[in-house]
Image (cartoon, rainbow, N blue to C red):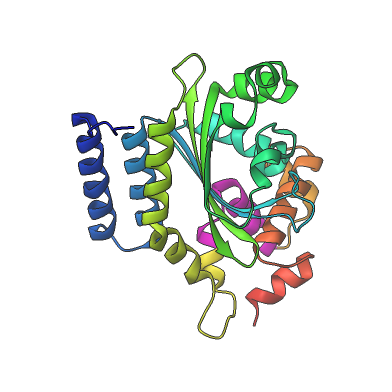
Amino acid sequence: MRKSRPSIADYRAVSQFVGALGEISSADHRPDASLRHLTESTGALIGAGVLWWSIVGDPPPPSRDNAAIITHSYVHGVDESTLLRWQRAYLVESGYRQHPMWGPFARGAGRLRSACREELVSDQEWYSHPHVAEWGRGLGYDDILVSAVPLGAGAAAYFVAVRPWGERRFGQRERELLELMFRSASWCYRNWLEPEHDAQGGLRLGGVRSRLPPRHRSILEQLLTGRGEKQIAASTGLSLRTTHKYIEHVYRAFAVSSRAELMALWIR
């Protein structure tokens, strides 16, 4: 069967892709700036305004369920109030564990992979799922495109593109472009991780702190001043339960299990 010739749109997409990579590599070489360029360029390339970049610890085999841990997260394209709701839904309340897409997608852990939502979850299951009704519709998103690149040691970088409720779905072209972009810019997210550890493998505290979401960073500062959970909850307007979950996330980011261990890192 004769293959069709590339269209003008295909050539234009390749040109945009090469240009975007050039902009990322020639921009400010700070990891966070490179990540911002990667996110914005990818969104423009595939036609997605909301993108979620994260480092995910894949669950150990044979249990490929939704029990992965999000250790770093960066959301682009949402306003502050939506971002706070997003963080509460997925980082604090671990809402991704009820998300119908992540279980099927996690079964391919350990390899480069990409998928459109409809390849993993049928329309009937998607639109009748309570999590989609509560969080998807509540946050205003519908169709999802995801790509994952393994980083080793059971971790992977995820790039999730989202389109608003009612917009057209992602197709094969966008999926291929996302995977190509994400794979080709691997140096960007690998560099973003490296500053967390020094040459001896020790934790760089400033690197970890700078990558915490704003609310988590604020809670870290209060933990380090010795404030109790009730005081932190009162100052942030969060419930005690939610505050405790935020604190647990901070502990995970620094690979500790208690306030004493956390504070010990900063007094060495």
Residue 138 position in % (x across, y down): 62, 20
In the image, 21: left or right of 106?
Answer: left
In the image, 94: left or right of 118?
Answer: right
Q: Examine the rendering and report whether any part of residue 73 can be seen.
A: yes
Chief secondary structure of the magenta span?
A: helix
Foreground residue among 169 and 223: 169
Q: Is residue 198 above or below residue 227?
A: below
Name the image quarter holding the N terminus: top left
Residue under the image location 58 percent in, 81 percent down: 201
Residue 204 position in % (x across, y down): 54, 73
Q: Quadrant of residue 102?
A: top right
Residue under the image location 50 percent in, 60 percent down: 210
What are the residue bounds of the magenta stretch? Answer: 209-225
Q: How many marks?
A: 0
Query: Residue lying farthest front?
Result: 1
Q: Quadrant of residue 212?
A: bottom right
Residue under the image location 78 percent in, 65 percent down: 257
Q: Is residue 125 above or below residue 109?
A: above
Foreground residue among 224 and 139: 139
